[in-house]
Amino acid sequence: MAKSIDVSDVNIYYSDFLAVEGVNMTIRAGAVTAFIGPSGCGKSTFLRSLNRMHEVIPGARVEGKIVVDGQDLYDASVDPVAVRRQVGMVFQRPNPFPTMSIADNVVAGLKLNSGRMSKSETDDVVEKSLRGANLWNEVKDRLNKPGMGLSGGQQQRLCIARAIAVEPQILLMDEPCSALDPISTSAIEDLIHQLKNDYTIVIVTHNMQQAARVSDETGFFNLKATGEPGHLVEFNPTKKMFANPDDPATEAYISGRFG
Amino acid sequence: MTAPTAEIEEQPNDWASVRGGVGDRIFSGLALAAGLTIMAALAGVFIFLAIKGATGFSKSSDVYGPHAESFLGYVFPLLVGTFTASIIALIIAVPLAFGIALVISHYAPRWVATPVAYVIDLLAAVPSVVYGLWGAFYLAKKLVPMHEWLHEHLGFIPLFGEPNVSGRSPLTAGIVLAIMILPIITAISREVFSRTPRLHEEAALALGATRWEMIRMTVFPYARSGMVSAVMLGLGRALGETMAVTMVLSVGFDMSWNVLATASPTSIAANIALKYKERSADLLNVLVATGLVLFLLTFLVNFAARWIIGRSERRMAR
């Protein structure tokens, strides 16, 4: 189920503004890959280009190749809607659908894909996904209550349940813990460890300890200079990255001597 | 620990509001006054209608003539006329307005959306007399073939009876009203559609929703209350519209459900405008009473719509 991602010569634009330049990397299947770097360096932009969410913004476009399972996501014949069904995403701020119950939130994506489902099928998926997101025990008695009634950390796990309910090949996470307290953060990190058996996970984080804790490989993005596009400075196994990085800029950033 | 008394006495001064909240109090007073004015105006209208119209409910039967003998017989055809035209207008205008609003807020690129929005807003600025003239002298004739077609193919439904040769039917009046209420419904729904939080829209898109699925999952639930407001304002304008209906409709007093008919009952508002000049004191009371009926019915429709929307929201908030 998990698939690797081959990225070659990717440039990402907002209208005429080049935001990210010349990214090449291979994201391993069934592993956790983390992107770190200062604000505005394009790591979230790059993440959003992996499921074609970048182009939702008017004028935004991507050049280059992003190949999953032998298929270039930016090929003219590829439907962005189909890409997003294969590549799930969890956002920085929890965003359950406010008018839907917990159960409806979980199956929202599934209903798009498969139309009508029987009650028992739906119940199975809800339980499986919520268990997968470590949320089942906390919400099993109130599945018909609105998703907005949960705490921030629970809402974020609900969003993860919603994303994995459609059984994507890849799961993208855009700073999934930045709006959460340490306990919720640790719950989500544990979850990421479990999920990597089944999914290729790509996570953007501002928290370097988090990158060190959860990821197998790390990419460091940086701006060449103010006003210049962001680029990938270094991409290596996380252990090497944090112990003995190739690039002095990486070491400066990781050790807190940045600038 | 005991602090010196002098310090404790000074402390409250440090924490008291420096400006004393004068601006806040003025603003809250103004806002309250504005709110009360609306309530007072509404109550005033109601009291006026009730006092002036009270006697209009029970005049001698010749006042209601020549077509009716009692107040009920007088007002019922008018009510039917009012609601027929308004409902036709809503049936045509509401889907169109929501469609236009969605195109402007979610589908069209900005260079298309801005001029379209502008043109739609301009429609609201055209005086209703102009719509009336256009409807009566131009549109009505053009719609005659449509009347005939409807009668021929859907004539088994009582709504589409013997068609009108001039085209000046309740259907035409409804179509003119639809064009008149289109801008307000479009403008308000466009505004609420475009306020949908980006976070929710992206959540739907990231799950692999098409644009239409995204709109159904996030935009409509979020905008529902505003959409009802928009429709209610449109309905209010349609119910109260005088000139367009007066001019388009060839008036009769025969009660009928045939929306294609020639001599159909006019609307309450149009009837008041028509009869106001030739009034006797007694007839004036009757006209005011019909106004009161319209006022109360509009109120009821509004409350009903709010209640329906509130009920579904309360169910979600449990």
Image (spheres, coloured by chain):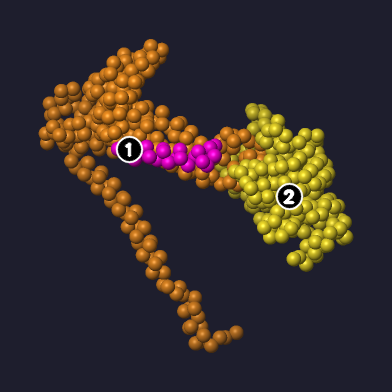
B118 lies above or below B15 = above
Query: What amino acid is labelled 1 in the image?
Result: Val
Membership of B122 in magenta stretch:
yes
Which hue is chain A drawn in? yellow
Q: Is residue A197 visible?
A: no
State the residue in front, B23 or A103: B23
Q: Which of A219 and A208 is in front in this view?
A: A219
In the drawing, what numbered circle is on residue A21? 2
Q: Residue at 68% of width from left, 33% of height from top?
A: A79
Task: Tell me the element at label 2.
Answer: strand
The picture places residue A212, in percent across and down from the top left corner, at: 81, 56
Residue at 87% across, 60% down: A243
Side of A199 where A15 appears, left or right: left
Magenta stretch, residue numbers: B105-127
Using the image, name the chain to which the residue with label 2 belongs. Answer: A
* Pointer 1 with pointer 2, Cβ within 8 A: no
Q: Mark 1 lies on which chain?
A: B
User: Chain B's colour?
Assistant: orange
Q: Are marks 1 and 2 on the same chain?
A: no
Q: Quadrant of residue B179?
A: top left
Residue B262 or residue B295, whichever sits in front:
B262
- Residue B14, x across and y down, in percent: 49, 78
Q: Mark 1 points at which residue?
A: B126
* Mark drawn on residue A205: none
Q: In which quarter of the image is residue A87?
A: top right
Q: Quadrant of the N terminus of chain B?
A: bottom right
Q: Residues within 10 Å of mark 2 (few under 14, many from 20)?
A: many
The answer to whether residue A241 is seen in the rendering is: yes
- What distance separates the C-alpha of mark 1 from that of mark 2? 53 Å
